Amino acid sequence: MFDDRVDVAVLVGMPTGADLATALARVDRAALNGFELVEVAKAITRQVAHYQAELLATVAEIAYCPPGNETSPAQRTDHPAEYAADEIRLALTLTRRAADTLMGDAYTLVERLPAVYQALRSGQVDLARARVLDQETAALPEPVARQMVDLILPAAGELTTGQLRIRLRRLVIEADPSAAAVRQRQALAQRRVEHGLDTDGTATLAGYHLPPDRAATAAARIDTLATAAKQAGDTRTLDELRADLYLDILNGIPTDTTPAPTSQGGVELVVPLAALAGLCQQPGQIKGWGPVLAEIAAKLADQQRERPWRYTVVNEHGVVVGHGRLRRRPPAGMAALVRARDRTCRAPGCRTPAHRADLDHTTAWQDGGPTTAANLGVLCRHCHGYKHSDGVTLTQPTPGTFQWTTRLGHTYTTTPEPP
């Protein structure tokens, strides 16, 4: 609580601005327990976002100021000054790139996407999320960009930047598949490989603007080879194996492990049947990667026609209720069902793909928890360990919905991923 015994709970509903700043200035952290300190941290984050919005609004206003000095009247021009960013660069001791970025954010959020600016000012989103909203709608006409923002803003504050980027990317593809295809073809013309030394003496070798279907199958092949090597007794970690195999393949060095023909680089897709048939342009999704154009999903499916197919059935709410292989006699596939339903680790904000995560009994088997889909969930190794740490509890009120209570008493809920 505050030093004058005002309950910290008042911070939760307090609007950002002068009153919240005053309240936060009176907080005595030494008098707070862990639960209360988390509430203070959340309030500070909202207030920081408010100040970020105020800075951007001020920077945007500076761009329209004519030349003058400390005695000049408060005049504005009808267009921004060409070197406005340099005024900011010198005043705030920024690099030219940092000043240009700040000025660009100011224009985008104050003038192009005013709803995002207001969300930032009220603390609904922070600057990192605001930038994602800008980047993922940058290629859209301004009216369409604002429509996309209006659709996703209510949920934006509850999503990590990665989750927000994936969900917005799907909305953008759905809004205008043809325009998305044109943007992709233009970007493919800029595909390249970059390399260089890192600060720790290692090196980076990476490809950019690659065709997503070919990149996904290449990554899946490396993953399959690494897993096979690990199963054969290789002592390297999977990450080390993937990196070493990546270089071996590029350098023409034969790999020691050859996976079975049915497992060479398969990619799991979630895609509407109508899109595969060419009857609609709804985007598909590459497991672990995110949404892609319908034509890319169809191409990937065609490339894998000789491998075992999988089906996923969803109910009217988009929740996965069935999953299996399209074979004459499909197996029970409970683990496959749970992984298809959960898609990623079920800890809040974690996006580790299901195929790289553990299958966990929500209520432990030794405590009477049954081995059923309603008591199983996907957790990555880190979050699995976190679940079993002191003070943390996890329940699954309904299949696919997970409720976490942290060691400091805060509760967070993850719901099934959108189809």
Image: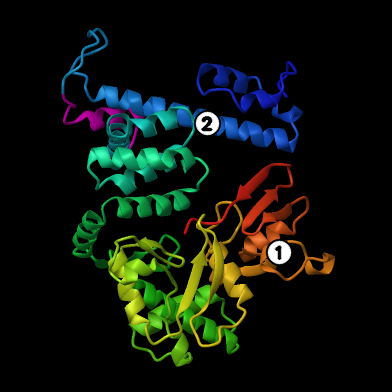
- Read off the residue under disc 1: 375
164 displayed left or right of 315: left
Give the left or right position of residue 191, taking residue 390 as reference. left
Q: Secondary structure at mark 2?
A: helix
Can residue 306 be seen? yes
Residue 418 location in percent, x, y? 48, 55
**Residue 194 in view, yes or no:** no
Picture coordinates of residue 233 (x, y %)?
60, 88
Q: Magenta stretch: residue 91 in it?
A: yes
Residue ID for mark 2: 46
Q: Which span of residues is magenta-colored?
A: 79-96
Tell me the mark number nearer the camera, choosing from 1 and 2. Answer: 1
Q: Tell me how many marks there are.
A: 2
In the image, is residue 220 above or below residue 185? below
The spot of residue 179 in percent (x, y) is 21, 54
Separation (CA) of disc 1 from disc 2? 36 Å
Amino acid tagged 2: Arg
Horizontal side of residue 275 vs 243, given as left or right: left
Q: Residues within 10 Å of mark 2 (few under 14, many from 20)?
A: many
Q: Amino acid at mark 1?
A: Asn
Taking the spot 24% from the left edge, 48% from the top edge, the residue there is 139
Which residue occupies 69% across, 62% down?
385
Residue 386 among magenta residues: no
Q: For the N terminus, give its image quadrant.
A: top right
